[in-house]
């Protein structure tokens, strides 16, 4: 195999670190070309001394200055850059083969678009890119001749059990023409799966951050607790697989062993199973179509013992309902939903609002928003900024 150069956006995050873990198991196959983060100099310094990338990019200039000084003192040759343009440059760089898009939130959109236009293999963890700009991003992937490998465990599972025609040729075929009836996204149900509506109103930040099955960054962990994560994933599945909203169902499965399923018109249901460890989908994305060792232990079905399923409760978890509504509204509604959610989650993490204020804020912002057709990234950036403003207003009025 030829050596492949990898850029990791969000290298210091949970997905970024797990990507480096898998890469370091295959030193003859992957070279760490560039690493990017927001502001965490300490972690980036560690990563640079371990992986010696050609480039390290910090979004924040002050962090980049600090990192430059630290790297100089250890005699590192890594070139440090900063700012949004630099993030795009390391995503579209001529020497790069693979881009892991694992920045959290809407901030991941521009570099992911840059990688798509430059025809890279994109390992997409940043689901917010598809929620905000699904049609523009999918079109950029096709026009740029890029390949798109979903890293979100559910979508990676679906990708693995989809007909090959779908995964090879993104552009046209509808799911039903391929014999697919629907996709079934599994959801763990999060830490509050069994909490009552009364309890949900008073749950704390610490309780929300205590996910039963997955170790993830704080934003997605709160999204999992509200089930907005599943809502974002419904929208993500819509764009990735050309699935209409009524072809996407959610089933709560507390063990997180079945990562998702595809039902065919003949009644067959294909599922992908495994331990809940993101190194499996990451290794799949890195190696595709080959299979690579990931370091994940064998699934022990006898210890798992049972697989349970139940329907999601849209009364206790209104975020999932609101996300379906935004998808059905179409146009800029999902981008507005995403922006309002980011602001509400930030406020909850800062302990400024209660848990159930998250859906309330998002719903209020969507109710007063003016939904437009999606035309450009610039328009989406403006809409994102406006929705954030409206969400902040809503929160300060609480
Ligand atoms: P983390 O919070 O752990 O990490 C976020 C990473 O993004 C950090 O490296 C952070 O840098 C960087 N970052 C944040 N903002 C910016 C910015 N504006 N510019 C550049 N870099 C930035 O998140 P996760 O790894 O958990 O999640 C990353 C993405 O993957 C999210 O979109 C999430 O939804 C998705 N995902 C994650 C899963 C998981 O298991 N964790 C599963 C499925 C999807 P710094 O350290 O400097 O702040
Ligand atoms: Mg997921």
Image: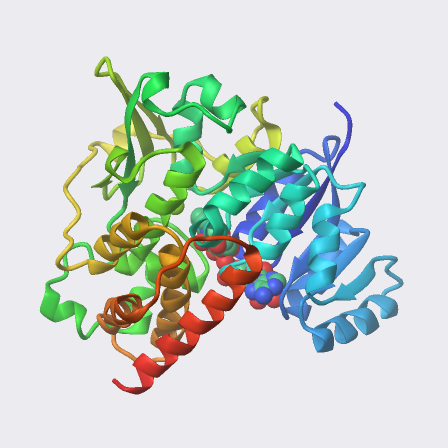
- Ligand 2 in which quarter: top left
> Which of 376 and 58 lies nearest the eye of the viewer?
376
- Position of the N terminus, as image quadrant, is top right
User: Which residue does the image show at 55% across and 52% down from the upper left?
Assistant: 102
Tell me residue 372's x, y (percent).
Answer: 40, 58
Tell me residue 355's x, y (percent).
Answer: 25, 71
Q: Is residue 238 left or right of residue 89?
A: left
- Position of the C terminus, as image quadrant, is bottom left
> Which of 283 and 149 lies nearest the eye of the viewer?
149
How is colour applied across the structure in the image? rainbow
Q: Is residue 204 left or right of residue 126?
A: left
Splitting the image into 4 quarters, where does residue 205 fall? bottom left
Splitting the image into 4 quarters, where does residue 110 fall? bottom right
Residue 10 visible? The answer is no
The correct choice, above or below, for 315 with respect to 354 in the image is above
The correct choice, above or below, for 76 with respect to 68 in the image is above
Tell me residue 283's x, y (percent).
Answer: 56, 34
User: Which residue does the image show at 76% across and 70% down from the upper left?
Assistant: 67
Tell me residue 64's x, y (percent).
Answer: 75, 71
User: Which residue does the image show at 79% across and 55% down from the upper left?
Assistant: 55
Splitting the image into 4 quarters, where does residue 275 fall? top left
Q: In this view, which residue lies farthest toward the top?
A: 266
Residue 329 visible? The answer is yes
User: Which residue does the image show at 38% across and 39% down from the upper left?
Assistant: 237
Q: How many marks?
A: 0
Q: Is residue 350 left or right of residue 283?
A: left
């Amino acid at each position: 195999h030829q050596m492949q150069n990898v850029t990791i956006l969000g290298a210091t995050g949970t997905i970024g670190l797990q990507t480096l873990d898998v890469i370091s198991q295959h030193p003859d196959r992957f070279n760490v070309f560039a690493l990017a983060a927001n502001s965490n100099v300490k972690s980036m310094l560690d990563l640079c001394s371990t992986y010696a990338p050609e480039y390290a990019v910090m979004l924040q200039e002050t962090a980049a200055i600090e990192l430059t000084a630290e790297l100089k003192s250890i005699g590192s040759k890594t070139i440090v850059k900063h700012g949004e343009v630099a993030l795009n440059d390391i995503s579209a760089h001529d020497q790069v083969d693979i881009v892991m898009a694992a920045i959290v939130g809407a901030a991941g959109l521009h570099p992911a678009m840059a990688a798509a236009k430059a025809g890279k293999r994109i390992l997409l963890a940043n689901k917010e890119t598809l929620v905000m700009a699904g049609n523009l991003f999918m079109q950029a992937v096709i026009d740029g001749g890029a390949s798109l490998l979903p890293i979100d465990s559910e979508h990676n599972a679906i990708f693995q059990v989809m007909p090959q025609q779908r995964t090879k040729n993104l552009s046209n075929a509808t799911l039903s023409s391929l014999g697919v009836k629907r996709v079934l996204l599994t959801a763990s149900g999060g830490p509050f799966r069994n909490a009552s509506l009364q309890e949900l109103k008073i749950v704390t930040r610490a309780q929300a951050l205590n996910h039963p099955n997955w170790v993830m960054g704080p934003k997605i962990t709160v999204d999992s607790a509200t089930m907005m994560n599943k809502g974002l994933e419904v929208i993500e599945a819509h764009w990735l697989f050309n699935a209409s909203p009524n072809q996407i169902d959610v089933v709560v499965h507390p063990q997180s062993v079945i990562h998702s399923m595809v039902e065919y018109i003949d009644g067959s249901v294909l599922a992908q199973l495994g331990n809940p460890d993101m190194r499996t989908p990451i290794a799949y994305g890195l190696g595709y179509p080959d299979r690579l060792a990931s370091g994940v232990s064998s699934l022990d079905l006898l210890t798992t013992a049972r697989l349970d399923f139940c329907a999601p409760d849209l009364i206790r978890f209104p975020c999932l309902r609101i996300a379906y509504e935004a998808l059905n509204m179409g146009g800029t509604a999902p981008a507005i939903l995403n922006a309002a959610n980011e602001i509400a989650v930030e406020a909850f993490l800062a302990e400024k609002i209660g848990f159930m204020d998250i859906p309330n804020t998002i719903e209020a912002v969507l109710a007063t928003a003016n939904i437009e057709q999606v035309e450009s990234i610039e328009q989406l950036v403006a809409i994102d900024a406006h929705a954030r403003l409206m969400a902040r207003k809503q929160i300060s009025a609480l």
